[in-house]
Image (cartoon, rainbow, N blue to C red):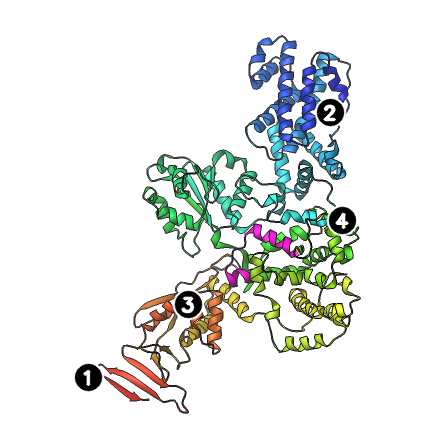
Amino acid sequence: MENSVFSYLDKNYRYLNNYIRDIDDALFTTPHSAIIKGRTFVERLTQEIAKLEGYGLLISITQAERLKRLEEDGVLEGEIDSLFHNVRILGNKAAHADVEGELEAALYIHKNVYKITCWFVQTYIDYKFVPLPYKSPMPLGHKVTDINSDALAELLKKMESLITKSELGGKNSEQAFDELKINKMKKEEDVFEDLIIEDILDNIVNKKCLIQELARLKESSKEAVEGLGEFTPFKRYMHIERDAQQELEDIIVNANKSDKAQLILVCGSVGDGKSHIISYFNNKYPYIKENFILHNDATESLEPNKTSMDTLNDILDNFSDENIKSSNQKLILAINLGTLNNFIDSQYGKRFMLLKKYVYDKKILETSIEDSKFNENSYFQFVNFSDYHIFTLKDGRINSNYIKSLITKITDTSELNIFYNSYKKNCSNCDCSHICPIKANYELLSNKDVQESIIDLLVQCIIKNKIIISTRALINFMYDLIVPRAYIDVNSPIFKSDIKKLNNYGFIRSLMPNMLFNHKELSFIFEALNELDPLNIRNEKVDDFIIKFNNSNEVISYFNQFIDYPKGYLDKLNDIDLGDTDDKKIRYELLKLFIRSYYLCGKENLFSLKDEVYEKYIEALYFWNRGDKPKLKPIYDDVKNGILKWNGEANKEQINIFIGKNQGKYKVSEDIDLKVDTSNLPKDEDAELKKFISTLKLRYKNDKVGKSYEIDVDFSLYKLLIQVNRGYRPNKKDKNHFIKFIEFIDSLEETGSQNNKLIFTEKNRDINKKYKLEYDNEFEFYKFVEM
């Protein structure tokens, strides 16, 4: 602060200057401490004012009471009175709870302390004193010498402007600070500035490489820890609104207004973002901290010697059958479905029969889509994250604004994107720029076609492998996609030397298309992607191209013609000589790079790498969840034919069955009347489905027995049934993998004609004769005749 004004305190109030020095020292390193010191300084100064005005007894009362008395007697008036109260309110807030945006609050305190001191000097020490205009402070010392001072100065200028506006509007500090917080949450500029400040507080020197910003994405970074309370600037920057967020927000807002007890069950699976969104709301709405209790069943325990069931019993005590009607507690409980099921079935379940009934009535533990809007007549509310996915279904295709938005957070060409800023500032001036795979991969990820292809691949992993991709895992995946850790030790202080030493072989293997499919050891996502490698797709056109590629001496021309790479992506390889001994082995690496790149961002119709069975399944998933009957006949027919052919080829409307010993000469069949039952179809008229079941629940019935049988058809089963329809015979491994489907077929077989009629067909003969074993109901005997 300006020394001129505080030097007036040296004669009679020297001890107050100790607080000023402490505030200046703590402002950019421990702003919370600066807020507390500022509050204390103003309290001590107010006591001195009371002495000067002859109110010695005011020293022993609270600051609020002291200020009130000084107001009543006209000592403090107008703007100066507001400044004293601003510091008191904000200081008290910091003393009793964490203040979001502490640096902003500390800056606010800093300016108010300066203005209060100027007023004190003019009023009680030197009435001729003319204060200098307040100057925004800047970080001092070696800790921040490399910080972007221009960006910080702009932030402080903006802060000062906002504070001035709030003061002109007659707002107290709490209102002003809330306004700052709202602006910060809503505007990307503020988040960007917070990230700069965070670097200052973390004592991070000037970042001279893109890799230093990308490190934020790593699972091992400090940002990876997820809790219900903390919501760091980086998490705010990476936060993307999801469909479940709006539903939960509506419930929380309405529950807060309710005068009865409210238990909000935020249900789902591990890693689906429950804690993240609750943390977001906890920081967005102050009343949540004040009016709600938050509990995360996965991370919190009341006592080390208690089980999770014991802890839940204690936490939910006010929602037990005996207490719920007299309680007004509001609780947000993030809980995995498995834990919820275990709790209501545990020894404590009998205390929570109302909760148990609610869970069953709402089918929370079942795979179904239920209405979860706020019910003002209920003590219980719920949002099931399992109903939502990181992708939606639209017009028979997948769409993911969520994944796309996350990638955009990394690649967007905005001055407010910390990653792009680093790329623009550092990569262009780097002497490794033309040979750096990290830069090349970042540029390729900025390609819209590549983004769409990656989204499609990730959804394929979810549908085909049934993996759950959390936001944290997705962010770490982006890091591994850009940074080839297998070839460059980015933790080494000389990692740029490693980049310069990369030969052509290592450079090619470090590029994103190869990284994407070639490193299943990196994570479960990469392991799933390895199974989707386009190199596994073979057809006539692909084979023809491989022959041409292997016989060409100008392979780079294929990349230029058919791959939409960023400018200069393969410049390092321009002088490659495939006839050279060292470069001979990389032709195959280039071939792999080409096919994988063509999948991501290919041009022209060179060959097809599409999975038509998968596309047909996704289309069926869309129409089934919408309840669009006319579009569903093909999928029901495919599955029905697969059922009938599961035990081998049979005549129309017949299924082979196994009776007694395995027969090598005959196959045994029965008639079966299998009809489609669409009575369980959901009904959703939205063009884009946000809540849907990710498997097909198909029903078939037999009118004779008057019963329907349901089977869950996931992609793996559907793919196998398509293979069966094309002549494939399931082996023992297939049958062990699809036990439930085997049980389903056994149930269907019991509805067939086996108790009245069997057909025996010879096998492996020039002419396979057929015989019929049939029961004559009239004369009550079996007859065996040739057909």
Q: Earlier in the sequence, mark 2 or mark 1?
A: 2
Say few, some or many: other residues with alpha carbon within 10 Å of mark 2 (under 14 / 14 to 19 / 20 or more).
some
Label number found at residue 736: 3
Q: Is residue 353 found left or right of 550 in the rendered image? A: left
Q: Name the residue type under label 2.
A: Met
Query: Helix, strand or loop at disc 3?
Result: helix
Question: Marks 1 and 3, Cα distance to the nearest angstrom?
Answer: 43 Å
- Upstream in sequence: badge 2 or badge 3: 2
Residues at marks 2 and 3, CA–CA distance in whole angstroms: 76 Å
Q: Secondary structure at mark 2?
A: loop
- Say if 158 sits above or below 438 in the image: above
Q: Nearer the viewer, residue 443 or 652?
A: 443
Of labels 4 and 2, the one closer to you: 4
Q: Which residue is mark 4?
A: 426
Q: Nearer the viewer, mark 1 or mark 3?
A: 3
**Marked residue nearer the N-terminal end (3 or 4):** 4
Q: Position of residue 455 (x, y in %)?
A: 60, 59
Magenta-highlighted residues: 460-481
Residue 166 image offset from top left, x and y in percent = 66, 30
> Is disc 4 surrounded by few (<14), some (14 to 19) or many (20+) residues within 10 Å?
some
Residue at mark 1: 779
Q: Nearer the viewer, mark 1 or mark 4?
A: 4
Q: Is residue 549 above or below residue 94?
A: below
